[in-house]
Image (cartoon, rainbow, N blue to C red):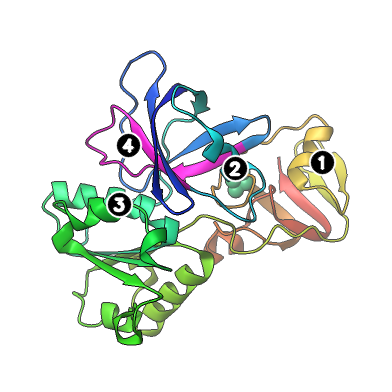
Amino acid sequence: MDVVIVDKYCAAEDIVCLTLASADGKPLPAFSAGAHIDVFLGPNLCRQYSLCNPPSRHQTYQIAVLRDKASRGGSIKAHALKVGDALSISEPRNLFPMSDGASHSILIAGGIGITPILSMAEQLSAENGSFELHYVSRNQSRAAFLPRLMTTHLASYSNYYFSDQPEGDRFDIHKVLKDQPKDAHLYVCGPAGFIEMVISSAVSAGWDTDKLHQEHFKPANPVLLSAKFSVRLTRSGQVIPISAEQTVIHALAQSGIDIPTSCEQGVCGTCMVQLEGGTPIHLDAYLSEEEKGNGCFLPCVSRGVGELILDY
Ligand code: FES
């Protein structure tokens, strides 16, 4: 879809907020809280950003982008965009949907992880849902959307924690998890270490994993390239060598076999294929242990030992 940037402002230190409208003036597709869009920032440069506006107001889309010191180009390009610039985006997809059956929702955001959490808070507030929001940031100047949380209908649901606060005022996951209703659901988004801390604390406190929902902004594992191996394709019988410098996706593309991709970081699931044999090295942040056990494989980042057999 073609869109133009109709607003840009600094939402916090190193964070810009961009508002996108369709290039032809037509309404943008509806989305549900937790959804993201792919933003095409240049050749071979596609990034995923969560939508942070209220789902009920989808005439425009709002995204927020953190300038990442370790950026591979995406956040730098996004920060350089100006009002009036044209962009191409995908339709919204939701890999972080909210559950219908929760009597209470606990929304937890670390840093830029506030973006999908904000959209969830807006949706729950509009539906008169029961929820609480916990927003953890290094300090106030790096916390995006504070005025929107502190001075609007969301204020009474929201709690803030800054790492430069006195110790007793800092975020304590054990306090948050305590005395919650049995059918509460928890949603967390932010840096991988923060998500792991929240999820592992909840699991240790006896929470069912089906009530714990998370969204990573980056792969939990770095995209490691390991020794060479090969891939056998069951449908054509082709055997394709994968060098130490290549991903499976790129090696297959060189042989004329295109597997659809989106993030190419192991976080969206678009490239999922079925493994029929071999020893995989899973390097993604998307598949559950059960899916891995069932042979799901994400060839944009994951690798193998010896020969992998793919149903493709
Ligand atoms: S393209 Fe997103 S997980 Fe592979």
Q: Is residue 53 magenta?
A: yes
- The dot on residue 251 is 1
Residue at position x 57%, y 44% in the image: 75
Q: Which residue is mark 3?
A: 118
Neighbourhood count class around disc 3 (C-alpha, 10 Å): few under 14, some 14–19, many 20 upward = many
Residue at position x 51%, y 43% in the image: 48
- The dot on residue 31 is 4
Marks 2 & 3, CB-CB < 8 Å contact = no
User: Which is more toward the observer, 97 or 68?
Assistant: 68
Q: Quadrant of residue 282?
A: bottom right
Marks 1 & 2, CB-CB < 8 Å contact = no
Residue 157, x across and y down, in percent: 17, 62
Q: Which residues are magenta?
A: 46-65
Label 3, label 1: how far apart the Cα atoms are:
39 Å
Q: Which residue is mark 2?
A: 76
Say if disc 3 is inside 8 Å of ligand 1.
Answer: no
Label 4, label 3: how far apart the Cα atoms are:
14 Å
Neighbourhood count class around disc 1 (C-alpha, 10 Å): few under 14, some 14–19, many 20 upward = some
Marks 4 & 2, CB-CB < 8 Å contact = no
Q: Secondary structure at mark 4?
A: loop
Looking at the image, tell me whether mark 1 or mark 4 is earlier in sequence order: 4
